[in-house]
């Protein structure tokens, strides 16, 4: 059974392995992180933990039974009771409800642990999986965006009203 955990320093090796193993898979639907992300990973990880401690972000990893990272579920730009949700799931874990369960859990944490009342998210039009997950959890489309030159949609979720609603 996989468990969603708040990002810690000891997650670094498994998180780096997750990002390396899935780099090509992720690049097919979201902008690539670039080589610098991997060469500067340790410094970036420490900086993110510092920012998390300050309350500006809330990062989570979905950890499998063997300690491997199966997904990331992040809340960024935390301000005024709102944050932006971003997530990615390992290719080997897709199609099993992992993303939907992870997004639901991070939404619950956003409301109950971090005191947030609204989340936003964006995805490209060709990322059907993410669009379905956001709809299942209760996010509603609120506008059009461009992500790295690709057409996309912005979504919003009122945590007091929409959490757990299913469009499936």
Image (cartoon, rainbow, N blue to C red):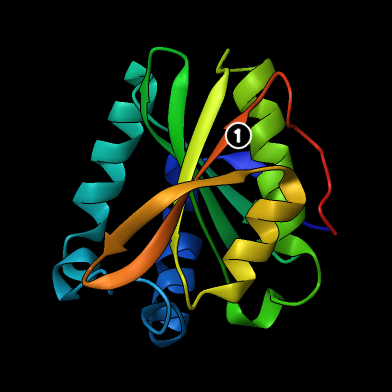
Question: Depth check: 93 or 150 in front?
Answer: 150
Q: Position of residue 34 (x, y in %)?
A: 19, 73
Q: Is residue 112 visible?
A: yes
Quarter of the figure that contains the C terminus: bottom right
| Vertical placement of residue 119 versus 82, above or below | below
Residue 101 vertical position relative to residue 93 in the rendered view, above or below:
above
Which residue: 73% across, 46% down? 137
Q: Residue at x 17, y 69 (%)?
A: 39
Indicate whether 138 appears above or below 91: above
Q: Residues within 10 Å of mark 1 (few under 14, many from 20)?
A: many
Q: Is residue 98 left or right of residue 118?
A: right
- Identity of the residue furthest to the front in this view: 143
Residue at the location (60% across, 34% down)? 157
Give residue 61's position: percent from left, percent from top: 57, 50
Which image quarter holds the N terminus?
A: bottom right
Q: Secondary structure at mark 1?
A: strand
Q: Report whether 167 appears left or right of 45.
A: right
Quadrant in the picture for residue 163: top right
Locate residue 35, reporting x and y percent: 17, 75
Which quarter of the figure has residue 48?
A: top left
Residue 78 pos. (x, y %): 38, 24
Residue 69 appears anywhere in the view: no
Q: Is residue 97 or residue 40 the one in the foreground?
A: 97
Look at the picture and state if 38 lies above or below 48.
below
Q: Report which quarter residue 160 is drawn in.
A: top right
Q: Residue at x 69, y 50 (%)?
A: 102
Figure label count: 1
Residue on which the image places disc 1: 157
């Amino acid at each position: 059974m996989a468990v969603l955990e708040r990002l810690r320093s000891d997650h670094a090796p498994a998180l780096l392995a997750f990002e390396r193993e899935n780099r090509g898979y992720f690049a097919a639907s979201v902008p690539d992180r670039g080589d610098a992300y991997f060469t500067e990973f340790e410094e970036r990880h420490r900086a993110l933990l510092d920012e998390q401690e300050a309350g500006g972000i809330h990062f989570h990893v979905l950890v499998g039974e063997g300690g491997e990272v199966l997904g990331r579920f992040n809340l960024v730009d935390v301000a005024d009771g709102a944050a932006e949700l971003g997530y990615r799931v390992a290719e080997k874990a897709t199609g099993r409800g992992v993303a939907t369960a992870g997004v639901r859990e991070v939404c619950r944490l956003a409301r109950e642990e971090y005191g947030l009342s609204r989340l936003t998210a964006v995805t490209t039009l060709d990322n059907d999986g993410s669009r379905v997950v956001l709809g299942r959890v209760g996010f509603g489309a609120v506008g059009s965006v461009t992500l790295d030159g690709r057409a996309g949609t912005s979504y919003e979720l009122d945590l007091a009203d929409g959490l757990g609603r299913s469009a499936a």
